[in-house]
């Protein structure tokens, strides 16, 4: 049987070789990792530069579009404001014209109505004065006629002879009874003449 020392000898001889193999493998791995990191950094930098260019172009385009949009909106707003101002001016002009026309028509109608009312009042006053004058003349003529009748009655009464005293057996004449109402008539007519 081989001894333990015999078994350990080949292992001891292989250890330095295996160590060198591992060192070489580690060096290769380190080199490869370093190379990969360099490639990754290079690719990342290139991609970052490209993305930056794309983003710069996108921002430039965005600024250009926003500027154009603001210019378009400003132009449209100014045009709309000008149009609205013109429409408002026309509406105010129409409103002032309509108001002036309405006031003119109203004033003309008021003046015409005032003239018609004045004519109607003058006509009514003239008619009333004519009626009052006619009534006064009629009353004056009635009073004058009543005065004439009263004067003729008084004159006839004075010119009549005194009647003889009637006998006691005879009834009283009815003529004085007829004259009593006529006395009241002339007195009333004279009062009416005084009041006139």
Image: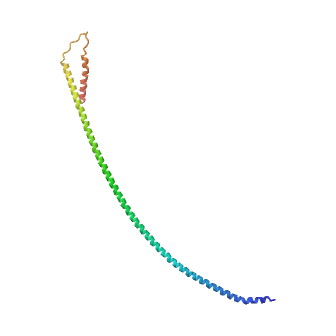
Q: Residue at x 28, y 46 (%)?
A: 112
Color theme of the render: rainbow
Q: Residue at x 46, y 73 (%)?
A: 61
Q: Residue at x 21, y 29 (%)?
A: 141
The relative height of residue 43 versus residue 135 in the rendered view (above or below) is below
Query: x and y percent of residue 194 in the render?
Result: 24, 28
Q: Residue at x 42, y 68 (%)?
A: 72
Query: x and y percent of residue 4 in the render?
Result: 79, 88
Which one is in front, 70 or 190? 70
Query: x and y percent of residue 15 in the render?
Result: 71, 88
Q: Is residue 104 left or right of residue 22?
A: left
The relative height of residue 97 versus residue 27 in the rendered view (above or below) is above
Q: Is residue 157 left or right of residue 41?
A: left
Q: Quadrant of residue 93?
A: bottom left
Question: Total marks drawn?
Answer: 0
Q: Residue furthest top?
A: 169
Which one is in front, 3 or 157? 3
Query: x and y percent of residue 172 in the render?
Result: 25, 13
Q: Quadrant of residue 36?
A: bottom right
Q: Residue furthest left?
A: 159
The relative height of residue 154 versus residue 96 in the rendered view (above or below) is above
Q: Quadrant of the N terminus?
A: bottom right
The relative height of residue 89 versus residue 152 in the rendered view (above or below) is below
């Amino acid at each position: 049987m081989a001894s333990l020392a015999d078994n350990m000898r080949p292992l001891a001889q292989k250890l330095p070789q295996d160590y060198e193999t591992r060192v070489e493998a580690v060096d290769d791995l380190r080199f490869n990792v370093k190379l990969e990191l360099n490639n990754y950094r290079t690719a990342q930098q290139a991609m970052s530069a490209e993305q930056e260019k794309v983003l710069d172009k996108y921002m430039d385009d965005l600024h250009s579009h926003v500027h154009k949009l603001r210019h378009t909106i400003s132009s449209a707003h100014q045009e709309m404001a000008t149009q609205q101002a013109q429409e408002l001016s026309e509406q105010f002009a129409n409103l002032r014209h309509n108001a002036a026309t309405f006031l003119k028509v109203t004033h003309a109608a008021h003046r015409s109505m005032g003239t018609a009312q004045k004519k109607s009042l003058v006509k009514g006053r003239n008619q009333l004065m004519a009626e009052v004058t006619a009534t006064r003349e009629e009353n004056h003529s009635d009073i004058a006629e009543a005065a004439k009748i009263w004067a003729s009655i008084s004159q006839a009464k004075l010119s009549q002879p005194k009647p003889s005293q009637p006998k006691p057996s005879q009834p009283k004449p009815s003529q004085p009874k007829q004259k009593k109402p006529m006395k009241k008539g002339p007195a009333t007519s004279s009062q009416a003449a005084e009041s006139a």
